[in-house]
Amino acid sequence: MAVPDETKDPNPVLPESNAPEGAPKTPPAGEPSSKPTAEQATAQTQAPETKPAATVAPKPDAAAAKPPVPAAAAKPAAPAAKPPAKPEGPKPEPWDSELVRKLKAQYGSGIKEASTYVGQKYLVVDSSMVYEILLHMRDDELYDYLVDVTAVHYPKREAQFDIVYILYSFHNNERVRLKTQIKDGDALRSAFSIWPTANWLEREVFDMFGISFGEHPDLKRILLPEGWKGHPLRKDYPILQQDTEWVKSNLGIESGQ
Amino acid sequence: MSDFENDYRHAKPGQGGPGVKDYLDLDTKDETFLDANELVLNMGPQHPSTHGVLRVILKLDGEKVLGTECVIGYLHRGVEKIAENRTYAMFNPYVDRMDYVAAVSNGLGYCEAVEKLLNTEAPPRAQYIRVILTELCRIASHQVWLGTHALDIGALTPLFYCFRDREEILKIFEKYCGARLTTHAFRIGGCIYETYDGFEQDCLKFCDAFLPKLDEYEELLTTNRIWVRRTKGVGILKPEDCIALGVTGPVLRAAGVKWDLRKAQPYECYNNFDFEIPTGLNGDTYDRYLVRIEEMRQAVRIIRQAVDGLPQGPIMAKIPKVLKPPVGEVYTSIEAPKGELGYFIVSDGSLQPYRVRVRPPSFVNLQALDKMVRGLLVADVVAVIGTLDIVLGEVDR
C-alpha cells in the first residue's frame, strides 16, 4: 500500500542531479518526463530496502515475472519491456479544418496548437484568451455542452498546470478538448457564466489542485472538508505526512503507515 | 387524466377536503400569512431518502423551497489519486467502487479508455459479452433506482419487486465472474472469463421472465393516482437547462433531447443492435420514470440480440503483459445507466497513469437539483433526489 506512494511522492522535490546521469534507459518521453527519472532516483534511494534481490538480478526475467508489483517492476521493466512496447505509439497529428482556420484567423497566436491524437481533437490555447475562445466555441461553433473541466499537474514545467476543457457539440456530434497552461498561483476566468455546469467542476479543480477561477460565484472546497490542508491531486502532495499527522492528532498514536 | 380533474382533492376550498393542489398553489395565493422568517433546514447526510450520504441544506419559506445547497464529499476516497499510484491493471477494480450499483458500466468505461490509449480494441466476442453484461447492469441499476425512488414517494411494494428481480441479474454476474456487486468483470483488452455453460440460456430466461415483471411494476405505478400526483410536473428541467447544466442520461432524454452515446458515438458493438432511444416530453419526474422503464425494455432487446449473435473467437486482444501505454492523453465516454461516464487518462509512457480523471454523471447531474426544486415543497425534494438517480459513491469518488 505504502510502497507506490513513497516511490512517487518524493518525485517533484528530488533535484534533477539525483537521477543517474546519462542513463540510457530513459524512454523518449515528451513533456511529462518526470516519472522515469523519479523511478531511477527511487531505485537508488529505496532499492535496498524494498527489493534488494530483484534490482540486481538479471533484468528481463524479473520484469516478466513480476508485473503486478509496481515498485519492483518499474525499475527493471524500463529496459526489459522496451522491445515489445517500442513500436512507436501514435503521434499527435496536425488538425486542419474550417474551425481551426477560423479560430486562427480570429485569435492568431492565441491558438498555439491544433492536433488530433488517436482521432481525438484538441486545441492548445493561450491562457489569457480561454474565456473568449470558450464563449466563441459555444456561440459560433455550437459546442453547447461542457462535458468536463479538469487539470493535470506537471511540477517540473514552468507553467505547472494543464487545464482541460472537454466540449461537445450536439449539433455536429463532435468533441473537442481545449487545453491551456497556467502557472501556479495564476487564475483563470471562470466559465460559469457560459455554462452553469462549470460551477462544481471548477470547484473540484480548485479543491484538488488549488487553481482559482476569477468571477466564480462560490469558489470553495467541494469534496474535501473546509479546513483541509493542501490540494491532493498535486504531484507534490504528501499523502503519508498528511496521514501520519491526522492519525497523531486524532487518535494520539503513531501511524502504522 | 380527466379523472383527476374530477377528483375530490381538486375541489375548490370549501367544496371538499383540502387537496394536494391547494398546497401546490400556495405561491399564487396571498403570501402574507407565509411571510415568516426564512427557515434553514438540514437534510442528511444520514437521511434515508438522500440515497447515501448527501447533505442538502434547504432554505425554506414554510413548506416552500427557496434554494438548496448540496454538501458532498462524505464518501470521498481519492480514487483519482489512487489511480496515479497503481498500474493500469491494478486500478481496474477500483472503478467498480464508484457507481457501485452499476459496477460493470464503470469497468467498461475504464477499459475502453485504456484500450483507446493502447490503440487496441477488444475482440468481437468480448465486445458482445461486454454488451450483454452492461445492459444487464443497466437493468439492475434502474431497478435499484425504481425501488428506492418509489419507496421515497411512499410506494413500498416496488422495492420488493425490484430487488427480487434484480437478484436474477446478480446471480448471472456471480456465475460469470464470482462477484455480485463489484464485479471486475472486464479486463483491459477484453474479458478474462469465458462465458459459463448455460450463460446464453440464463440471459434469455431472464429476459423472458423480466418483461412481464416490468409490466407488473408499471401496473403498480404508471396509472397510480398517488404516484402520478407526486411525480407529474415535479422537478421540471427544460432541455436548454439540461444542456447548460451538463445533465446527461435519462434526465436529459426525459426533457426531449434524443441523445444517447450508444447511438451518437457508438462504442463496443452497439452499432450492430437495433434499439430505440426513449424520450419524454415534459422533463418532469414522471417522464423520467417512463423513460427509464422504457430503457429497461430496450436493454432487454439489446441483450436478446447480443445473445443471439454472440460470435465465437478469442475474448482477449493481444496486449502486452506489462501495460505501458505510449505518451498521450485520451478522453472516452460511455452511456452509463446514469448518464455520460467519461475517463480522461494521461499517460507518460510509464507503468502507472499520470492522471486519471473520471467524469461522473451523478456528480454533474446532482448540480441540477437546485434548479429543479426551487419553488417546490420539501416532500418534492425527496422525489427529485430520487429521480436524479445519484449514487454517492460516484458523486464523491
Image (cartoon, coloured by chain):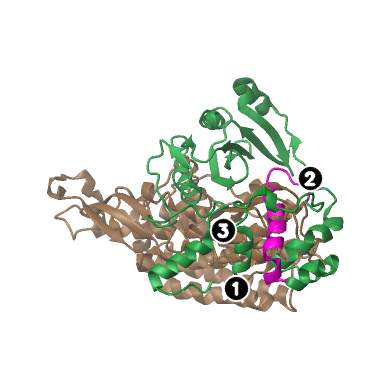
Is disc 2 placed on a helix, strand or loop?
loop
Subunit under mark 2: A
Mark 3 or mark 2, whichever is nearer to me: 3
Identify the disc placed on residue A90. Answer: 2
Q: Relative to residue B253, is residue B367 drawn left or right?
A: left
User: Which of the 4 quarters of the picture holds residue B336?
Assistant: bottom right
**Chain B, colour shown:** brown
Residue positioned 37% across, 46% down in the render: B371
Can residue B267 be seen from the camera position used here?
no
Residue B366: x %, y % from top left: 44, 53
In the picture, the quarter occupied by the N terminus of chain A is: bottom right
* Residue to which mark 1 is pinned: B169
Q: Tell me which amino acid carries mark 3.
A: Lys
Mark 3 or mark 1, whichever is nearer to me: 3
Is disc 1 placed on a helix, strand or loop?
helix
Is disc 3 placed on a helix, strand or loop?
helix
* Residue to which mark 3 is pinned: B81
Residue A222: x %, y % from top left: 42, 52
Magenta stretch? A27-51
Looking at the picture, does residue A256 appear above or below residue B222? below
Residue positioned 63% across, 67% down in the render: A3
Q: Relative to residue B375, is residue B177 drawn left or right?
A: right
Residue at the limit of the structure toward the right, as seen here: A83
